[in-house]
Amino acid sequence: MSVDFLFQYSPLELFWLLVPILVGIAVIETLAIYFFKLKGKNDFKEWILNISMGIFSYPVNGIFAFITIGALFWAKEFQIYTFPLTLSALVLCFILDDLTFYLHHRICHRWRWGWGLHRTHHSSERMGIDVGARQPFTKHFTGTRMLKIPLVIIGFDPLMILFCVFINGYYQYLCHTQTIYKLPRWYEYLFNTPSHHRVHHARNPKYLDANYAGTLMIWDRMFGTFVPEDPKEPCDYGLVVPMTSLNPLRILFEEYANIFKDITMRGISVKDRVMYLFGPPGWSHDGTRKTSTQIKEDYARAIKSH
């Protein structure tokens, strides 16, 4: 079955078509928490900030997307096969694109330059649909989006890949909530869910560096990064080093400023400067900070000693 009709709109056009729906879902969640006392925490100021950042960042990312989109269409010159625009090809493309998202997402947590942009999304100390809109506009400057180039080379049309990126992104948007505890067991096993994504946003040592899934949970299960939500340990949201400011400029650029400050520090080696840019977040030349791996190791030792 041909699905070429799905690709007649660009991701940016689809975004503007869906904005009222996405904002509407966030409004419904907020009202449900307020009137029906569903689990969650409302913060009107932050809600406005997050939605505004989303409405601003997606179009800006769409403008800068020429970096990625240009690379994808350039890679088409090197295709070794051409998949037809059919439903079966779309499903296969979605699965493989979801794998590239997993890799991109994991890299952005383990590489400080990538964390510089992704930190924006994780800086909220609450969890709600609106947090899904809290996004940076520098997504196309990390280079990790180039992980999609192999998909073009093996035969997928760039427009099909971009459609999969769009669907994947909006599925994840809906996973940012506390109002849904668990979905059916089979669904929790196969797919990313609010429960799994709450773990991903938590700063509890037990939950760090877990659940990078976009839509499919199989990648976390395959690569050893899956951690289930433990009802005995509620998720504590936000950054390991808290950042409670509602200043959008600080939210967007603080980590980049921190990186610049570190790499221009006096009295450190070239290797140290490289590590401050390409090493894991939390790394320091003098050991005064801790990476997520070190935090988890300390936690494991503490648990073992008890």
Image (cartoon, grey):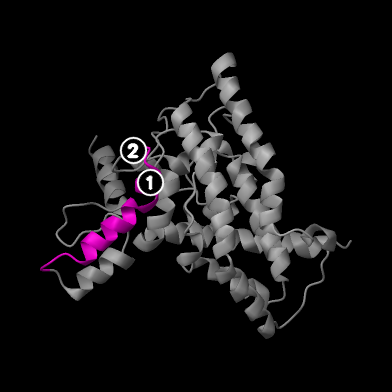
Displayed quadrant of residue 6 = bottom right
Location of residue 300 with respect to 179 vertically, above or below: below
The quarter in which the C terminus is drawn is top left
Q: Main secondary structure of the magenta part?
A: helix
Task: Between residue 250 and residue 77, name the one nearer to us.
Answer: 250
Residue 280 image offset from top left, x and y in percent: 32, 60
Residue for point 72% across, 66% down: 159
Displayed quadrant of residue 174 = top right
Residue 49 seen: yes
Q: Which residue is mark 2?
A: 245
User: Residue type at mark 1?
Assistant: Ile
Q: Magenta stretch: give its range.
A: 245-267
- Which of the numbered marks, if any, corresponds to residue 251? 1
Q: Is residue 102 left or right of residue 255?
A: right
| Residue 202 part of the magenta-drawn span | no
User: Residue type at mark 2?
Assistant: Ser
| Residue 251 part of the magenta-drawn span | yes
Residue for point 82% across, 67% down: 85
Displayed quadrant of residue 236 = top left
Disc 2 residue crowd, few under 14, some 14–19, many 20+, Cα 10 Å: few
Q: Is residue 98 left or right of residue 247?
A: right
SS for tag 1?
helix
Residue for point 27% across, 71% down: 274
First of labels 2, 1 by sequence position: 2
